[in-house]
């Protein structure tokens, strides 16, 4: 009996655990602190800081199975999914790592041992490739790996081939850690490839399009650092980074030759077959649709579980594209109502044991996908009508291209991602005007500037570790200047003259560097005759960078200084951070345990908290949350922080942490309501993993006030709130505004709601009475005088003062009667912060030119 996917995953992990590797759970699909990635797309992503030299781990060897999405950005397999049996948007990557520990010999030997001894793959079918060098780039071949293969395994030398830089050299980017890689391939037999995908070229290892020889495992040897000039320097610590796709190895070990025929997809395909009354293998069209739906359902389920919510931008837009592509293919197998959300429990049941978050978030994910499907279905049929009209026009004109304007209209009005329109067009043998679409998008797009500090902190390797343990105290400290960052360079010698802007690095500091949603400290760093005004504090790896400007006197490396953060500002930040923890607790009390943190900002003037919840809070719920938080503030309870081993902290009942946040070991735990929470956790209101700064008692929050509650994305809500001085200022401003309004109306403040309501009713009555009125004679004459005449038609396009569509239609009728020749009339007006458009045509114009006023409006 063949192995199941769960067995294969488990045997891979246990194999390396027996060889001293630490199992590390998969990181989130939402990359942590890495704006260069759209999604987590490889197992090494969570260890990138180790390779860059900006971070470290308490272990030297690691093993895991990583959730990955490749759709959008550099790695994009979306368009290929469904059309073959091996492309995926979502997949699992099995991997093992060495951080400056073992290197090529062990990595090669263990890979061979697992594949052949444990999993029993036929040795005679396996091939290896190594880097063959590149003279143009002055890169030598990996002779070491080439010799090691026959030495540490029993593979014959003739099945160890040299590959190109494209296939056998790995680089993180244009600069940084890199190195050669060796790959393991399997020969599936002559019947697996007919050569049609690579005409004129014999089947072989790394032949593009060949499905006879496929890559199983890639083992990267990170041994160089490429500098900005392109020069390769050997790394002091050399690393191993490997990756093997679970779906592919399952297909091989289960003997099916089709990733979608493995047990990873079998439950999904079975559900789709039963729900749609089709059969996998029935036809190319049905098979493609089933593969698309099965793959995309997995991608959306895992992504939304990890907090990537469908939206109109960035990662969220890619997930929305994937979901809508699946919905479109659902139409091909008679699925016209929302159905993808019903696959979430199937996925959770199959994979929830290894990824328990799927079970924990199942209901939320189902609701999110259902709402997305419902929203798309509302516009899908109308959008398809527009598309068909465009196709008919193109074919009538003898063209082969749908205009960019139509592609944009389908996107902006009906939610059709451009690749969906491209797919629909290809099915009809047509192309789309992509350049025209981009021009329309550029006209439409509103460019929003993201907030950033004036000094951009670069990702520089080999920065020293800063001792920032004093950030939790108010005791003054002395520190030494180690150097500074200017123009992306770390400078360890010399001096900074007054007026210089830089990122100063000290051996120790009491400043808090921005992390975990809490903003960085400001303040001053002083020495005998000068000071450095700190405008922001950031963190690179384990190094704290004080960003600001030198004042009064030069600053030299080695100078003894006194770092002093702005204590009043820090106190306001702490009020908001402790207030955030109380808000998180209160939301769970009012809304339920499904509430999870999805992001936060803790600043001196406000707190912002994003959380999982599927609908807007009612006014009563908001008031209840405020009341609970302020009751906790009045209770004057202790706020206690302890640093403890992570494994011990994770066992505390009720302890919460942000999903997939990277926490150090030992970890800092903050509790409110009990100082003995590690012994009596039930006494605490809330217990959270948190490295931020906090108050000593809840009463120091002062007062808590929610000022807004809104939607951020589907299934994600956002609350903005104030504490302390800002909350008091806000309430005083509201009070003053109410007093002023009451004085204007000459009524007591407590009567304001009733008086405002009465005024609104009066305004509605007056507007209604004006609805039937048309325009005076002078206004009509002005509109006729300003009109343009084309041939025997008067074109009247203008703005009028009107409060309702009825009033505007009355003006149109009057203009048609007063015009001495046939007229085409388009009038616009604004009322109640909305735009009104009304068009009308004389009967002669409509008949002669075969147009309709409604089409003109569109």
Image: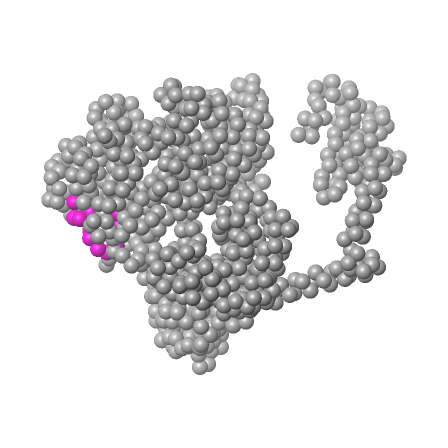
User: Which residue is painted at 31% across and 59% down in the image?
Assistant: 56
Q: For the N terminus, give its image quadrant.
A: top left
Residue 149 or 202: which is nearer the viewer? 149
Residue 295 screen position, x and y as percent: 40, 33
Confirm whether the magenta stretch covers residue 98. Answer: yes
User: Between 613 and 375, which is closer to the camera in this rendering?
Assistant: 613
Q: Is residue 418 magenta?
A: no
Residue 492's quadrant in the figure? Answer: bottom left
Specify the segment rendered in magenta.
Answer: 96-109
Residue at 80% in and 52% down = 755
Q: How is the image coloured?
A: one colour
Residue placed most toward the observer, 7 or 745: 7
Image location of residue 94, percent across then percent down? 29, 42
Residue 360 visible here: yes
Residue at the bottom extreme, as displayed: 528
- Left or right: residue 745 versus residue 248 is right
């Amino acid at each position: 009996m063949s192995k199941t996917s769960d067995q294969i995953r488990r045997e891979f992990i246990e194999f390396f655990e027996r060889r001293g590797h630490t199992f590390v759970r998969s990181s989130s699909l939402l990359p942590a602190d890495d704006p260069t990635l759209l999604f987590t797309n490889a197992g090494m992503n969570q260890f990138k800081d180790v390779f860059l030299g900006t971070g470290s781990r308490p272990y030297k060897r690691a093993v895991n199975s990583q959730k990955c999405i490749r759709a959008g950005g550099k790695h994009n397999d979306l368009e290929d999914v469904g059309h073959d049996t091996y492309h995926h948007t979502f997949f699992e990557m099995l991997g093992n790592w060495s951080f400056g520990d073992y290197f090529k010999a062990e990595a090669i030997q263990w890979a061979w041992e697992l594949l052949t001894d444990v999993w029993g793959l036929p040795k005679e079918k396996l091939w290896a490739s190594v880097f063959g060098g590149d003279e143009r780039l002055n890169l030598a071949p990996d002779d070491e790996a080439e010799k090691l293969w026959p030495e540490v395994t029993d593979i014959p030398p003739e099945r160890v081939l040299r590959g190109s830089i494209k296939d056998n050299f790995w680089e993180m980017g244009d600069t940084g850690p890199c190195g050669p890689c060796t790959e393991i391939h399997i020969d599936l037999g002559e019947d697996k490839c007919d050569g049609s995908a690579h005409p004129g070229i014999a089947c072989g290892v790394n032949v593009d399009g060949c499905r006879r020889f496929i890559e199983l495992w890639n083992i990267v040897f990170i041994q160089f650092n490429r500098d900005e000039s392109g020069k390769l320097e050997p790394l002091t610590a050399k690393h191993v980074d490997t990756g093997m796709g679970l779906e592919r190895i399952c297909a091989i070990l289960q003997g099916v030759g089709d990733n979608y025929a493995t047990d990873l997809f079998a439950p999904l395909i079975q559900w789709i077959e039963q729900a749609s009354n089709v059969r996998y293998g029935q036809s190319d069209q049905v098979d493609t649709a089933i593969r698309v739906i099965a793959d995309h359902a997995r991608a959306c389920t895992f992504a939304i579980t990890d907090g990537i919510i469908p939206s109109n931008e960035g990662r969220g837009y890619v997930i929305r594209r994937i979901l809508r592509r699946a919905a479109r293919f659902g139409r091909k197998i008679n699925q016209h109502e929302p159905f993808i959300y019903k696959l979430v429990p199937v996925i959770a049941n199959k994979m929830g044991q290894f990824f328990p978050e799927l079970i924990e978030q199942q209901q939320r994910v189902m609701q999110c996908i259902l709402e997305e499907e419902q929203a798309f279905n509302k516009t899908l049929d109308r959008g398809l009508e527009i598309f068909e009209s465009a196709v008919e026009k193109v074919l009538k004109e003898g063209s082969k291209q749908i205009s960019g304007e139509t592609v944009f209209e389908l996107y902006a009005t009906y939610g059709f991602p451009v690749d969906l329109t491209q797919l629909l067009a290809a099915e009809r043998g047509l192309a789309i005007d992509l350049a025209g679409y981009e021009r329309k998008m550029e006209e439409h797009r509103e460019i929003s500037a993201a907030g950033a500090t004036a000094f951009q902190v670069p990702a520089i390797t080999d920065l020293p570790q800063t001792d920032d343990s004093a950030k939790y105290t108010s005791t003054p400290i002395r520190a030494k200047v180690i150097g500074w960052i200017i123009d992306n360079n770390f400078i360890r010698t010399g001096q900074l003259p007054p007026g210089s802007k830089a990122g100063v690095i000290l051996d120790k500091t009491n400043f808090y560097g921005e992390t975990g949603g809490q903003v960085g400290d400001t303040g001053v760093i002083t020495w005998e005759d000068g000071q450095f005004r700190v405008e922001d504090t950031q963190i690179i790896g384990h190094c704290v960078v004080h960003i600001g400007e030198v004042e009064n006197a030069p600053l030299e490396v080695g100078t003894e200084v006194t770092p002093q953060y702005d204590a009043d500002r820090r106190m306001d930040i702490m009020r908001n951070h402790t207030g955030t923890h109380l808000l998180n607790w209160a939301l769970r009390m009012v809304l339920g345990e499904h509430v999870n943190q999805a992001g936060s900002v803790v600043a001196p003037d406000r707190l912002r908290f994003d959380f999982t919840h599927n609908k807007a809070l009612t006014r009563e719920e908001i008031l209840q949350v405020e009341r609970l938080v302020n009751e906790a503030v009045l209770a004057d309870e202790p706020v206690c922080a302890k640093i403890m081993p992570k494994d011990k902290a994770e066992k505390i009942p009720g302890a919460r942490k942000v999903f997939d946040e990277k926490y150090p070991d030992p970890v800092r735990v903050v509790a409110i309501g009990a100082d003995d929470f590690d012994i009596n956790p039930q006494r605490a209101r809330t217990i959270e993993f948190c490295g931020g700064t906090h108050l000593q008692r809840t009463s120091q929050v002062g007062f808590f006030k929610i000022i807004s509650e809104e939607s951020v994305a589907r299934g994600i809500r956002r609350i903005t709130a104030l504490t302390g001085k800002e909350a008091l200022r806000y309430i005083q401003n509201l009070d003053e505004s109410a007093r002023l309004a009451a004085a204007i109306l000459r009524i007591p403040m407590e009567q304001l709601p009733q008086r405002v309501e009465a005024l609104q009713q009066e305004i509605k009555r007056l507007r209604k009475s004006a609805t039937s009125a048309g325009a005076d004679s002078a206004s009509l004459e002005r509109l006729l005088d300003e009109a343009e005449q084309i041939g025997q038609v008067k074109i009247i396009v203008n703005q009028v003062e009107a409060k309702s569509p009825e009033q505007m239609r009355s003006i149109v009728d009057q203009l048609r009667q007063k015009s001495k020749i046939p007229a085409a009339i388009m009038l616009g007006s604004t009322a109640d912060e909305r735009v009104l458009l009304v068009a009308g045509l004389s009967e002669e114009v409509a008949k002669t030119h075969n147009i309709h006023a409604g089409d003109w409006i569109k």
